[in-house]
Image (cartoon, rainbow, N blue to C red):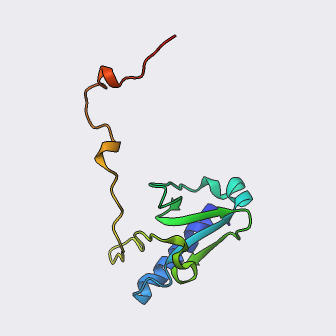
């Protein structure tokens, strides 16, 4: 499976979920064999917002393991393995579940002022 084939599969599953009006046929989990991830699917823009969320592509959890087949499972097939589920079926008639958790503001340096001298790392030679 190439990144383009992955996106096509996700699009088809999201369309099926929109058409049926429930989230059962929506994409629930992407399982990838580790060698395939390294050689092909590593080009997918996947990110991890938090450790609990794990690695995600288009807000769908990715599970990478040597014994995994490379497939996209529906939410029914994935069960709790992909929880917590995030936004699904982007579009005008968007279906969604729990909103994405926000990062605490303490994680982000928001001031335009430089770091206080007491907090700067020392540059000892």
Where residue 46 sits: x, y (%)? 53, 56
Where residue 114 sits: x, y (%)? 29, 24
Left or right of residue 24, residue 32 in this image: right
Q: Quadrant of the N terminus?
A: bottom right
Would you place residue 104 above or below residue 12 in this image? above
Would you place residue 99 above or below residue 42 in this image? below
Q: Residue at x 32, y 74 (%)?
A: 92
Farthest residue to the top: give it.
125
Residue 19 picture quarter? bottom left
Q: Is 7 or 75 nearer to us in this picture?
A: 75
Q: Residue at x 43, y 89 (%)?
A: 20
Q: Residue at x 52, y 59 (%)?
A: 54
Where residue 96 sits: x, y (%)? 36, 74
Q: Is 87 or 16 nearer to us in this picture?
A: 87
Would you place residue 32 above or below residue 19 in this image? above
Q: Is 41 or 51 nearer to us in this picture?
A: 51
């Amino acid at each position: 499976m190439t990144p383009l084939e992955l996106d096509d599969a996700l699009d088809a599953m999201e369309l099926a979920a929109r058409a049926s009006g429930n989230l059962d046929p929506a994409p629930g989990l992407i399982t990838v064999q580790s060698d395939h991830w390294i050689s092909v699917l590593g080009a997918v823009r996947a990110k991890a917002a938090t450790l609990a969320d794990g690695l995600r592509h288009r807000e769908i959890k990715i599970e990478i393991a040597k014994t995994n087949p490379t497939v996209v499972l529906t939410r029914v097939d994935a069960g709790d393995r992909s929880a917590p589920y995030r936004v699904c079926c982007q579009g005008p008639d968007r279906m969604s579940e729990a909103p994405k958790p926000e990062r605490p503001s303490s994680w982000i340096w928001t001031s335009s002022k430089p770091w206080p001298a007491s907090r700067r790392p020392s540059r000892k030679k």
